[in-house]
Structure formats: structure tokens, C-alpha cells
Amino acid sequence: MKLARLLTLRWLRNRPLRMLLSMFGIVLGVATILAIGITNRTAMLSVTQVFENTSGKANLIVTSADTDARGFDDRVLRRLESFPGIVSAVPSVQVQTILAEDMAPEQVGLSFFGTDAGGLSLFGIDPARDQDVRNYTILEGVFLSPDMDAEEIVLVKSYAEDNNLSTGSSVAINTEAGIVNLRIAGLIAKEGPGQLNNGAFGVIPLGTAQKLFYREDQFNQIDLVVAPELTDINQLEALRTSLQSFLGDEYSVLYPASQGRRMTQMLGSYQIGLNFLSGMALFVGAFLIFNAFSMTVVERTREFGMLRTVGMSRGQVTRQVLTEAAILGLLGCLLGVGFGIFLARGLSRIMEIVLAMELTRIAIPMDIVVTSVTVGLVVSLLAAFYPAWQAGRISPLEAMRIRAQSSQGFLVRFGWIPGSLLLLVSTIILIMNPFSYDVQFRMGSMVVVGLFLGGTLLIPSSVSLWEVLFRPAMRLIYGSSGRLGSSNVQRSKVRTTLTVAALMIGVAMIIVVWVMTDSFKGDLDQWLKGYIGGDLFVTSSLPMGRDVWKKLESTPGVEAVAPVRYFEVDWINPSAGEERISFMAFDPASHNQVTSFIFSQDKPDPGSALQAIASGDQVFISSVISEKYGLKPGDQITVLTKMGEHQFEIAGVVVDYYNQGLVISGSWMDMERYFRQQDANVFLVKIEPGLDRGAIRDRIDKLYGKRDNLIIETNQEILGKVSTLMQQSFRMFDVLALIAMMVGFFGIINTLTMNVIERTQEIGMLRGVGMTRGQVVRMILAEAALMGIIGGVLGLVFGVILSRIFLLAMTAMSGYSLEFILPLQRILLAVVMAFVISQVAASLPAARAARTRILEAIHYE
């Protein structure tokens, strides 16, 4: 044991560069798993905490089942107060407003979840009761007085400072009763409920809110605190079910965190790709470790032979190599944890941009740390197991006779058989997609790993074919040295395979990201031209009624104005379950003048389809819902409305990705009739031909912008922001794909360095018969170039195949049916990148080979 420890320490001390290269793969793998885990956990917690903190200590919340923003009357409160098991029922009125002095934002805010028109969120609360569910940290002044009709307000301190407001002063806000001045009683911290609306939040007395916003004896939400003995998850669910039955279908009894259901579902879908790529980063890291230890065994053949001659058994030699792998794995894991935490901070900043919200303080969950370290250690040992077994098989006589010569094993000669089977099985499984409910795509990721492993096993048997195919190109580029360099890739097929596989995976990951990005962008651009139709996009942080519609129509230079209103509804899906989706209400006549729908399948006559919508009781459904539930034109769907359950006939299937595509579209008349909504979210404005869009925008802003708090942008500006948001959303995928390319880069360095060491005598002989230093360099560069080309081409093939399979799997899992768009220029760029990386990585080993002295090389052992 003492000898083994001494040998391990000597190897680590004498080969620091090899040690660092061996650790690099595991550092990257552990870091990416940890960083993605921390970022995912932080983002999910931030989203859910915003909604949990809104209701604080409440166990359940009661809201209206329909989308009527007016809320429900106080009879519900009295019924809940008498229900067994309810300790406290706390009512609130929740409204959106703006400061009277606020100008409308000049630009529409965009996030991963849609548009954001800004504004101030206000809670009207009972100051005495509200303490039962929410905690407010007072930083300045005092909290609200017990007077339910006092004209006072408490704001978040950061929001007050941003708007130059202070305790004791007055603030003017827009209400339905007009502009009202409220005295600022105090300022609270941006924590708990203060996190709502990213800190643009305040509380006012319940009676004042009901009076100013015409909500007499009405509430939006009632927070419930239950008896301590009922807080167990099973008992709480039983109580929730009883309450739902007691109140009826007009009301929804929910858990506080379920208010963020749509956001967490969308975020979960986004994280599927992150989980997959983090696993792939560890996979390619394992290649680097395997490569490094394979080289170590070859380089130390004589050393292991000597150890066998002095009595060390096969098992002891194997354990020696595994011990070194464990030490390097542990060091790599520790460095990976540090790098992962650093990387998580950068990824969290990207996630903040994507979500358009400030994430909570980054926590480092120990379960994720333990998982990433455990996975890193296991992968290190697994990657080193085969080289360790090879080291144990070295016989003393073999080690004395030759140095650094390895025979072709079973996988080199017959690996194509299991490789072909793995490729076939993995492809069939991915296309059939038997794990459509694996929302995190963990099983899918394992099958993709099998796909890559199958491709890797095919490489050794095809190296000769690749070499023959590209031999003329290598000779053309590098001269006669290129011919010799290209043939060298066949001399150590295992090592070549590992290097090519690492490059192949890196290129494939980049292509998958680019294809998915372009496919999403292609479909989104097509949809957005209809969703953001016309010339101008007008929205507001306040409700926009029919008066705003008429003002816009009467503006000189405006040809047509189409109102749009999105709100949430529940429907009975074909699986007989209630599901919350979005309802888009539009006016068919004006909408047809400004923009048009993009029909997905069984394309009807647009005029007839719009006429059907205008006649009422008919809707368009999104292609996502159609794909997911097998619905088609002529089918009936059941929607829960203000009037109860109502059946709508499907008039057509349209492309619509709002709310992840969970959206149906109906007429403005049906919205008013069945849902009692009258206000618009957005107006799409078409200007008269030949007029300047900017001039008309400025005219509308001058006439009505400040008065009605309008936000007006041209459609080109909105589309540009969407494009930028998409690029930001996929930036994390690009980072992880580039990490995979870095692994390929260091793999080439490792491979060529070992090749140069093995061929020191040979290079000396070549120099002795007249080969120049430049020719030696070109020979090494040619060998690297061929590996780069093979890796790039295979990565291109696998990347295109995987991209196609991912799109098919996404359709089966979520209903998305995206057009497969192949960005040829960017795909060819990925292959060029693999070639360039091979040349840059080969420069150091090539320089070392060129410095070889002839006499020393001839006597090299």
C-alpha cells in the first residue's frame, strides 16, 4: 500500500499537465451539472416563492373560477368563516394601476412569459386580519391603521426610492374613481409579498380599495389558514376537496404556489434542454478521462511491467490505476464544485433576462452538490476502469520487449456490431417516444447517450475508409507530409476514436441548438406576423375600454384598429380533466382588416372561418391543442364560462404559441356574452398606405398616450425584441455546447501529445533522413485535421438526425409541431469550427515534435 501511494504521488508530481488534462473533463462535467441544477432550482424557487409569499402563511386560497376581474361578493367570506377547520379567512382586493405622474413606458417589456406593460400592483387588505397570513417588514414609518377607509398606502421601499417618494408625503394614483392622493404611511422591504411585480407593489385599506376601484363588498381572493391538525398534506387535500364541493364550480380552491402553475410549467419545458445538455457535458468529460488514462497506461507500460516483476499482482496494478483515477476524480469534483458555483452565477443572470424578474439569492442546495460530486466520482472510476483493467493485463515479458504498443481489442475489431444495434434501438425508441410523460426528458437523455455511444463504436471500423476518402485532400493541403499524417490516424484507433467522438458530440450539440433555435424562430416569426399584425402595437398597464378603441380609430392616418383580449379559462379536455388555458377574444370584422390567422391544417376559406366565428359559439384552437388531443374542425369542446359549462364548435386550427400554445380564439361578442369581459389587452393598428409609421405613432402618443397611459411601438420593434429574447433564451444552450467543443479541443491535445511521445524515435529517424521541422509540423497538423473533419462530419450527421428526432419527440410530448429548418450556413460553420479547433489544439504537440533532436530521439526509450 505504501508503494502504491508513493507511485501515485510520483505520477501526479511528475506529470502535472497530464493530471490537469485528466481532471479537466470531470471539472467541466461536475460544474455543468451543478450550475444547471442550481440555476434551475433558483429559478423555480423564485417563481413559486413570489406566489407563495403573496399568500404568506395561508394554506389555501379561494378565487373565482372564471376570469371576471370584478371578483366575488362577501357572502363567500361568511360561508368560509363558518366552515369546520378554517381558523382564519382573509379577504383581499387585487388591482393594477399606475402613479398619476407616471408616463407610460416608452417600450413594451418582453419576458419568457409574454408582454409586460409595467404598472403598480395594489392589494386592498384588512390590516388586522391580513397579519394572519402575510408578514410585512416595515423599514420606515408605520403600517396601515385599523381604519378600513383611511386614504393611505404602504409601498416597497425600493419602488418608492425609484419614484422619489418618501414616508409622510402623498402619492397620486390612477383609480376608476379618478386620480386620488394617498398618504404614504410607511415603506416595507422587498421580501415576502413585497416581491410581487418585482417590487412595484403596495397595500391600501380594503374599504378604500373597494371604493376607489368600484368593488363594493367584493374580493378577488380569500386566503385561508387551517387548523394545525389539518396541515398534513393528505388532510389538507381532503379539506381542499371538501371546500371545492362546498363552494361549487363558480370558485377555485387552490394551493398558493399553484398560482404560478403556468410559469413553472413553461420554465420546466425550457429546462428539459438544459438537463439534457448538462448530462451530455459530463458524457464528453468521461471521454476525456478515458482518453487520458488510456494514454497513461500506454506511456507507463514498462513501469507496470517492472511492478509485476517485483511481485505486484494484476489486481494490485488495476487498483493502482483506479486509485489514481479516484484521486483525480475527487480533485476534479472539488474544482468542479467551485467552477459550478461561479458558472451558476452567470447562468442565473441569463435566466433573469429570460424571465424578466429578479431571482432570489442563489442558494447552494447540498443535495445537488452531493449528486454532482457522486456522479463525477462514479464517472471518473467508470471511465478509468477499462484502462485500469488493461494495465493489469500487461505481462512482465511483454513490457520488457516493447514500449507503448497496444493491440487492437475486441471493440476496435467488432465494435461496429453492438454500435449498429445501439444506433438502431435508440433511434426507434426516440421516434416511438414511449416516455411522453417524462417531463424532464431524463429517459430521453439516456437514450440519446446510447445513440452517441453507438455512433462512437462505429468509428474504429470506419477510420480506414475515412482516411482513404480524405487522403487526397490532406496531400493537397499539407503536401507529402499530409499523406503520412493522415495515415497515422489508423495506428491507434482507440485513441483516434475517443478524440473523434468528443468532437462529434460537441459539433452535434451545437447543431441541435442551432436547428432548434432556427425552427422555433421560423415558426414564431410566422405566428408573430399574425399575432402582432398591422403596423402599430398599442397596450397599457391599465384596462383599455371601448373609448380607447374609438379614439384610435378616429386618429388621422389610421385605417383600422383590431382589439385583442387574452384571459384564462378552464375547459374540459378530451382526457376528461379540467385544464386552464388562454382565451383570445378578437373582433372578426376589424381583425380581418388588420391581420390574419395562420391556419395549420385542413385550411378553410379564411372568410368563411371568420364568418363562423362572428356568428358565435365557435372558436379556433391552436395547433398545439389539436396535436395534443387529436381535435379537428367540426369537433366540440366544453369551456367553463360565467354562465356555466358551454360547448363551442371548432371552426379551424391555427398556429398560436401564446401560453405554450394552450389557447383558443373566439369572438369579442362571445367574450362579452359568456365571460363578461369588455376591456382589451392590446390594439393592433393598421395605418393608411404610404404614411410613416413613426409619425402616426407620435401622433397617437401626443393625443392619447399620457391621458390613457398607452405604450405604442411599431411591429418591427416588437419583432426585434422577440428575436433578441430568443437569442438570450438559447444562450445557455450555446454555452454548454461550446463546453463540449472545449472537451474535444483538449482531447486532441491529449491524443497528439501521446502520439508524439510514442513516435519520438520514429520522428527522429524521419528527421535523420531529411524531413524538415516544417514537414514534421505539417504531418501532425494533417493528422489532427483528419480527426477534426471526421468528428465534424459525424457531428453534422448526428446533429441533424437528433434535431429531427427532438422535434418529433416535442410534438408527442407537448403538442408543438415545428417546421424543421436546417440553417445550412451555420451547420457548415460547425464543421469548419471542428477543423479550426483541431489545428489550434495540434499546434502545441506539433511544436514539440518539431523540436525533437535527432540523436536524442534515436536513443529515446
Image (cartoon, rainbow, N blue to C red):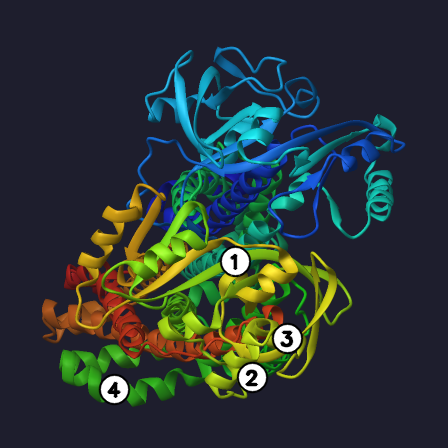
Going from the N terminus, do you reach mark 1 or mark 4 first? 4
Left/right placement of residue 420 relative to residue 105 reads right
What is the C-alpha distance between the residues marked 1 and 4? 62 Å
Which residue is labeled 4 in the image?
471
Judged by depth in the image, the label closer to the viewer, 4 or 2, is 2
Image marks 4 and 2: residues in contact by CB distance under 8 Å: no
Judged by depth in the image, the label closer to the viewer, 2 or 3, is 3
Q: Residue at x 29, y 55 (%)?
A: 713
258 and 297: which is toward the camera:
258
Element carrying mark 3: loop
| The C terminus, quarter of image | bottom left
Which residue is labeled 3 in the image?
433
Going from the N terminus, do you reach mark 1 or mark 2 first? 2
Image marks 4 and 3: residues in contact by CB distance under 8 Å: no
Image marks 1 and 2: residues in contact by CB distance under 8 Å: no
Q: Where is residue 246 in the image (x, y as percent from the top left)?
A: 86, 44
Q: Tell me if mark 4 has few (under 14), some (14-19) or many (20+) residues whose alpha carbon lies within 10 angstroms of its own.
A: some
Q: Position of residue 709 (x, y in %)?
A: 35, 43
What is the C-alpha distance between the residues marked 2 and 3? 20 Å
Q: Where is residue 134 in the image (x, y as percent from the top left)?
A: 64, 25
Image marks 1 and 4: residues in contact by CB distance under 8 Å: no
Q: Tell me if mark 3 has few (under 14), some (14-19) or many (20+) residues whose alpha carbon lies within 10 angstroms of its own.
A: many
Image marks 2 and 3: residues in contact by CB distance under 8 Å: no
Going from the N terminus, do you reach mark 4 or mark 2 first? 2
